[in-house]
Amino acid sequence: MKFTIARNTFIKKLNAVQRAISSKTTIPILTGLKIEAEEDRLILTGSNTDISIETTISTNDEEAHLNIESTGAVVLTARFFGDIVKKLPDNTMLLEVKDGFQTTITSGASEFKINGLDANNFPHLPEVDSQTTITLKADVFSEMINETVIAVSNQESRPILTGIHFTIEGNKLSAVATDSHRLSQRVINLPEPIKMPEDIIIPGKSLLELSRMLDDEIDTITLQISENQALFTFDETLFYSRLLEGLYPDTSRLIPKESSTEMEFEAPELLASIERASLLSHAGRNNVVKLTINAANKQAIISGDSPEVGNVEEEVVTKDIVGEDLEISFNPDYLKDALRSFGHTSIKMAFTSALRPFTLVPTEDQENFIQLITPVRTF
Amino acid sequence: MKFTIARNTFIKKLNAVQRAISSKTTIPILTGLKIEAEEDRLILTGSNTDISIETTISTNDEEAHLNIESTGAVVLTARFFGDIVKKLPDNTMLLEVKDGFQTTITSGASEFKINGLDANNFPHLPEVDSQTTITLKADVFSEMINETVIAVSNQESRPILTGIHFTIEGNKLSAVATDSHRLSQRVINLPEPIKMPEDIIIPGKSLLELSRMLDDEIDTITLQISENQALFTFDETLFYSRLLEGLYPDTSRLIPKESSTEMEFEAPELLASIERASLLSHAGRNNVVKLTINAANKQAIISGDSPEVGNVEEEVVTKDIVGEDLEISFNPDYLKDALRSFGHTSIKMAFTSALRPFTLVPTEDQENFIQLITPVRTF
């Protein structure tokens, strides 16, 4: 194998594939990057137990200036090889694999010789043989991931909750995540109704890596599903994620249909108040903040305290308050995550009682995005 | 005590004093910030076992909008108080100390009540009663610190080497640091000759904190020395550092007077080569890079290798090479630190033999700045 390529294009593709490569793995070859040169293209592959990424650079790509002199394949330690490529002196680099997978990387006056591994020992990527292809707007899907992934569980005790649950009904794609203390649900419209064989659960971590790859240059991505894999395709790149197996809990009945108190406000206003209150709740043993609503006075007060350090109290700037008076306590970090996911929007918060979960929805488009938080019992 | 102040001015001063405050200390009151309100000024003080910083905000400072309603003093947990002040909603804050050092901080709709401590228990700052005051250009002194502190030892086994050694001869102030593997020496000219009672050794860490405080707005700083303290004064701020006790080794005889091989180059050129070579030396067990000089061909080759990973070799772009052929090995990290301290300058590197220390000086101004590195024996 022997080829020359423009270093900046190569680095961009390398960075993408490195998302799938862990330097801490018990399978040594998986710390490696697989490089394959075919007649008219270069294929880079990285893989771990959760995700695999394969990306292609074509000889037709004008910016890449790819010139393949001879075909072949090799596996190189990914982190180390990446560091070398990034520090090379010249715009162009030459990579050549010789006997025993000895690999020479040349650029300007600099010549590296590093030990490679046999690419035949690199695991094969899963085969995704699906009839159904779902086409998604990259920015909308990325937003959907970021809005729901905050509620994914970090605890491996219930693995199913470490994923985001996707279902399709007609032309509505719905994503739900819950760690059993809070829940986030987002619905987006697909261009046309699709019949998905069954619902799927994709690990939150896989989706977070995927969303980081979806930059402004990528317009649409497609999703195909096989028995235990999801395959996202975009921009000459294949992104595989394993699916979580098992039954996702029925979350639809968790969301209250009615409310006794409602409060409307701008998300950044409440976020700033909660951030201040959590300075004190974090200092104490119980990370709890209290919201006291006086409906008649249209007054909402956030307070936090820590016996060792002190306390804080402040009135929140609200747009409207209706319903009954209420005193409710909750983990401020859950509310911070939820409010951040809304951005600069007007929010409606709805409560039923001090012990029942409360919800947040954007004042506009209330149907398609809902965050739910379970309060903390303090008495 | 009760005062109002513009929050941005207060935060700036708070950040400065926090440099002296550690959250991990066995003396609880030293995790605190002392705030003193006098008739016409506010004094903030922080202290640890190495450095103390005291800074003043005057009621005459127009940007501060300081209004002192009643005098007094309190000590507040520095990190916690800092976090609160930074997150307050309004441009102005009111601080009031009540019975039992209960402190109320009010800003906009937000009110914090935190527990304070008696300022009488805060340690007194050292008294520096010196006849001699040395005036220094802030930018030049800051540069001097950063150029020499790289060679300061991190090992507490020889505490004296964790400091920078300052001596004055006539109008020349000299700073030297060495960890016994390398040495950095910088000389600056003072406006007039000064008689300093004796040489002093200031901890490198103290000077690094000081240099971080010397921003572009500060033109000159003064230095006064007492038996065991150095006091730097600038911009309404007093910065105290303890001195290291003991005899600093005689470093003047370490610097070779003659050389057998000399090489001239641009610092960034060699730095880039060394960074590449150290990618491989870091992967191996011995962190060593080799420089091979062929004087007749005016050729210098940098190489690094790691048996497990591979090797690298490259010819360095030099401006001139004179003298004898040489093969010398060294720790690339020492050379990287040295080259970075020079910035974008032409450098002269001088060698006597493969086992003797070599030196680097800027081609211009060779007298006042020298870096010395001890090679590694590899045979």
Image (cartoon, coloured by chain):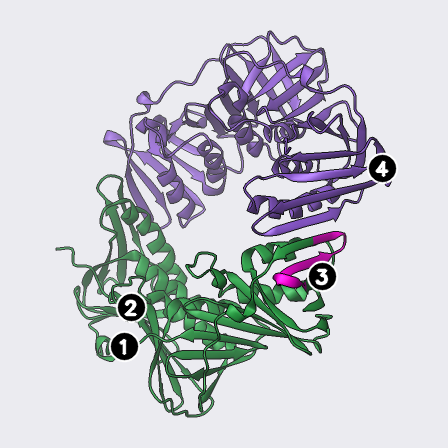
Chain colours: A green, B purple
Residue at image coords 58%, 48% = B307
Residue to which mark 3 is pinned? A93
Magenta-drawn segment: A97-111
Q: Horizontal and vertical percent for residue B340?
A: 67, 38
Mark 1 is on which residue type? Gly
Residue to which mark 1 is pinned? A246
What distance separates the C-alpha of mark 1 from that of mark 4? 70 Å
Mark 2 is on which residue type? Pro
The local secondary structure at tag 2 comes to: helix
Q: Of discs 2 and 3, which sits in the foreground? A: 3
Q: Horizontal and vertical percent for residue A139?
A: 51, 75
Residue to which mark 2 is pinned? A159
Q: Is residue A214 visible?
A: no
The local secondary structure at tag 4 comes to: strand
Do discs 1 and 4 share a chain?
no
From the viewer's perspective, tell me whether residue A350 is left or right of residue A150: left
Q: Is residue B266 above or below residue B234?
A: below
Task: Kindly indicate whether the residue at mark 1 contacts the one at mark 2 (C-beta within 8 angstroms).
Answer: yes
Q: Which mark is residue B320?
A: 4
Q: Chain of mark 2?
A: A
Residue at image coords 22%, 50% = A286
For label 2, the crowd category at 10 Å Cα-Cα, with few meaning under 14, some 14 to 19 and many 20 or more, is some
Q: Chain of mark 4?
A: B
What distance separates the C-alpha of mark 2 from that of mark 3? 44 Å
Task: Kindly indicate whether the residue at mark 4 contacts the one at mark 1 (C-beta within 8 angstroms).
Answer: no
Q: Chain of mark 1?
A: A
